[in-house]
Image: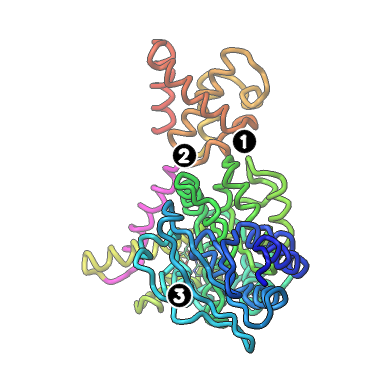
Amino acid sequence: MNQPLPKIWNACLAFIKDNISDQAFNTWFTPIVPIKISDNVLTLQVPSKFFYEWLEEHYLDLLKSALNKELGPGAKLVYNIVMEKKSTQNPFTLNIPSASKGKLKTQEVVTPLNLEPSKVKNPFIVPGLQKIKVDAQLNPNYTFEHFIEGDHNRLARSAGMAIAQKPGGTSFNPLLIYGGVGLGKTHLANAIGLQVKELYPEKTVLYVSTEKFTQQFIDAVKSNNRNDFIHFYQMIDVLIVDDVQFLSGKSATQDVFFHIFNHLHQKGKQIILTSDKAPVDIQDMEQRLISRFKWGLSADLQIPDLETRKEILLHKTRQDGIEISEGILDYIAKTIVSNVRELEGALISIMAQSSLNKKEITLPLVEKTLSNFIDNAKKEISIDFIQKTVCQYFKIDMEVLQSQTRKRDIVQARQLSMYFAKKFTSASLASIGEKIGKRDHATVLHACKTVKNLSETDKNFKVYIEELDKKITS
Ligand code: ADP
Ligand code: MG
């Protein structure tokens, strides 16, 4: 006797619910729609191919048990996969025999004509019949082998190596690597990913910049694929998100990231984050995210000391197959003290100079090349310098400029400082605001607009701007 479909499916759901977490249940089973049952074949409708593959990979045994329990050992399962916007007209069907012995396997899947790669929504998914593959998006050059160890990175580096041995299985989850630009955050995060791929080829690793993540999310929302976006990220075993400080001020993206983070963390998946600031210093970030960033280990990268800078240079020259005398390497390492990226940049300039002019790499050549380099570096204008210049120009104290006072002339000086900081530095609105009197990014944005408006309508103000511009850039 055939039992009614809802009753059977509800019984299956009750059994499933007992066996998995609420979150997994809500994510993967609530969206399933039972379609029909006939001759012991239950047809379920799932929202996407990805969804089907996820069920197959993670919950097939559970589904099988539920089905066998309700329908007996001869039960079969058929999925209807809803294709984008064509749902009912054009579903395609995959037959999954519910074998009574052993693990269920997908039969030769009949490739539906409408499953072209372009229809596969997630950009990382390489369409294939059997298993979804995710391109890890890692930089193959950023290995541990090429990541020189020093006092400045020892903790972060060894935590990274421990994680690579046991992704998700250490207390360093998440690992947050933070530090200034060019100190090796991206390199180290990639090295962990590469090592995991080597040790655990079956694990799904993904590197994504925060900007890319944000853009994908915006696109997904626009095209109504928010759930697919979330499901995609929730199936990653090792998720590396670079430069999370760029989540600052983006509350919808923070929200979705929060959910993905929780899901992965709960399932013991590894999360690796990088940031140019310590968690507490990240502006405009939800407190619940900041607190999660601190759950595992926050390890900072410092500027490498002289010996390590020399070692890095030596390693790079060997990697590129060039020879530079120790004295010269010593000179470069002593001259460039800011970060590893600058160090590399200096080395590249020297090599370029030498090969362009067909000259040997000598100390005079290096001195000349680096003097340009240092001049350029000096020309970089800091927010502090801008504030000082504005204060001198208007003869006011820096403290007053940064205070809460709303006196008109001080407000204008403050707004001008913000305007020039935006114009001459690459600092974010949030960090400009932070440095100029602890204001928020909206205040800075408003200041920039006001200065622009006044420059077009107020002649005196226009003169201030021109004169200050000259002082700052000369
Ligand atoms: P960040 O992400 O912190 O801005 P990157 O990871 O992009 O910095 O590093 C800048 C450059 O310096 C990269 O080319 C990287 O390979 C190199 N680098 C950084 N740290 C090291 C290190 N310890 N050993 C060798 N190269 C390094
Ligand atoms: Mg980086």
Q: Check disc 1: other Cα within 10 Å, few if <14, some if 14-19, many if 20+.
A: some
Residue 158 visible in this rendered orientation of the protein: no
- The residue identified by callout 1 is 434
Q: Check disc 2: other Cα within 10 Å, few if <14, some if 14-19, many if 20+.
A: some
Q: Indicate yes or no whether the magenta region holds residue 428.
A: no
Q: Main secondary structure of the magenta part?
A: helix
Amino acid beneath label 3:
Leu
Q: Where in the figure is residue 82, as x and y percent of width and height?
A: 48, 59
Residue shown at 38% from the left, 15% from the top? 456
Q: Where in the figure is residue 412, as x and y percent of width and height?
A: 54, 18
Disc nearer the start of the sequence (3/2): 3
Disc nearer the start of the sequence (2/1): 2
Q: Check residue 425 in the rendering and tell me which mark sits there, or answer none.
A: 2
Residue 92 visible in this rendered orientation of the protein: yes
Residue shown at 42% from the left, 74% from the top? 128
Amino acid beneath label 2:
Thr
Amino acid beneath label 1:
Glu
User: What range is drawn magenta here?
Assistant: 360-381
